[in-house]
Image (tube, rainbow, N blue to C red):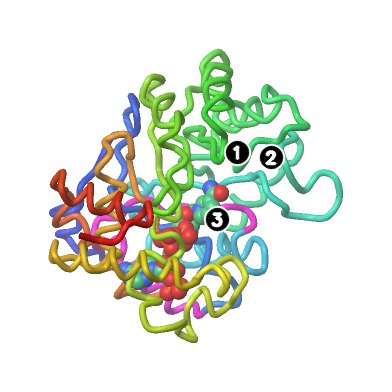
Amino acid sequence: MCVANDKRYDSMQYRRSGRSGIQLPAVSLGLWHNFGGVDNFENSRAMLRRAFDLGITHFDLANNYGPPYGSAEETFGQILKKDFLPYRDELIISTKAGWDMWPGPYGDRGSRKYMLASLDQGLKRMGLEYVDIFYHHRPDPDTPMEESLGALDTAVRSGRALYAGISAYNAKQTAEAVKILRDLGTPCLIHQPKYSMFVRDPEQGLFDVLEKEGVGSIVFSPLAQGLLSDRYLNGIPSDSRAARNFFLKKKDIGEDKLTKIRALNEIAKQRGQTLAEMALAWVLRDPRVTSALVGTSKVSQVDDNVAALKNLKFSAEELRLIDGVLAGKKAA
Ligand SMILES: NC(=O)c1ccc[n+]([C@@H]2O[C@H](COP(=O)([O-])OP(=O)(O)OC[C@H]3O[C@@H](n4cnc5c(N)ncnc54)[C@H](OP(=O)(O)O)[C@@H]3O)[C@@H](O)[C@H]2O)c1
């Protein structure tokens, strides 16, 4: 059993999720990559322990994280048993259902049958009685929203989850979902959208809806899967996500992207930060963002990402320069 650092709450910043009672760490850790059955268990364990020692109280999972599917929840369950059981009440653990999980018509999307079976499987894999947040992972255009969100409501009412969340719903769908959940009596705690310097869609309405409705946001892939770091400045390292050429493709790291990454890296240096640190500070500059949800492959990346919190302020000039780089203008 691990004995956690007794200074773990000294420097982490916690931000309130919308108008709810829950505060999340400004940096949260996701287990999409590097926690599967194919990955090194002791490395996964070391990253989780380091994260908790630094005040990261929130770990994000989904039914199909691995590979193989389900294995990130299994890995997490084993580490929970070895290290974190005494700390269960200090943790916010989330899981999701909405993507491909098991064969046949009931193992994907948004039916009540799929979502509740998925949650039950996840609880078993993690050895938990309940998760803190259960998400619908993506909207399902073929299932009435009332059914998918009704499954979240059932999950909460039956005690298998404490809060409900949605992910990848656009601004209009979010406004509708928030209303349905509120009418059901299970308010939406949080939305999980993709947001980074390279993907700014939530600025086009989603953040406005969330602010108006008092719903938090935890933004995923804030480092654009590692592009917004110094990882690819000198080619593609063999142990990187891009080297696996699946979720992050080698072809997505063209000269145009690299020119922007290099220019952003120079701005980060001027701020005394790594590019990853600046990328996280940048998403957190918006108070509507509750938490930056990162992935890591090494303990040193956990340290670096938390170090972002040492400098979250941007001058108007720095923001202008960053916008210029992102728009493809030459850095001044
Ligand atoms: N709701 C959804 O649909 C959805 C979708 C995707 C993700 N998510 C959630 O969001 C989490 C994060 O997603 P993500 O892994 O794509 O996030 P990300 O933080 O943008 O990318 C993580 C990758 O960036 C690299 N990295 C991290 N910290 C670094 C640092 N300090 N310096 C240099 N490189 C660094 C690592 O790449 P290497 O592995 O190459 O070292 C790491 O695997 C997931 O685990 C999951 O929980 C949700």
Front in this rendered view, residue 51 or 255: 255
Which kind of residue does numbered mark 1 sit on? Answer: His
Give the residues in magenta: 40-64
Give the residue drawn at x 30%, y 52%: 324
* Residue 67 visible at all: yes
Mark 3: few/some/many CA within 10 Å (<14, 14-19, 20+): some
| Residue at the spot of label 3 | 127
Image quadrant holding the N terminus, namely bottom left
- Residue 115, which numbered label? 2
Q: Hey, what amino acid is under mark 3?
A: Gly
> Is 42 or 213 nearer to us in this picture?
213
Q: Residue at x 65, y 25 (%)?
A: 150
Q: Secondary structure at mark 2?
A: helix
Instruction: Give the residue drawn at x 18%, y 50%.
Output: 312
Secondary structure found at label 1: strand
Distance of label 2 from label 1 (alpha carbons): 8 Å
Out of 271 and 330, give the one closest to the viewer.
Answer: 330
Label whose residue precedes the other's in the sequence (3 or 1): 3
- Displayed-image quarter of ligand 1: bottom left
Mark 3 vs 2, N-terminal side: 2
Closer to the eye: label 2 or 1: 1
For image coordinates 61% across by 52% down, the residue present is 122
Q: What is the number of the mark on residue 136? A: 1
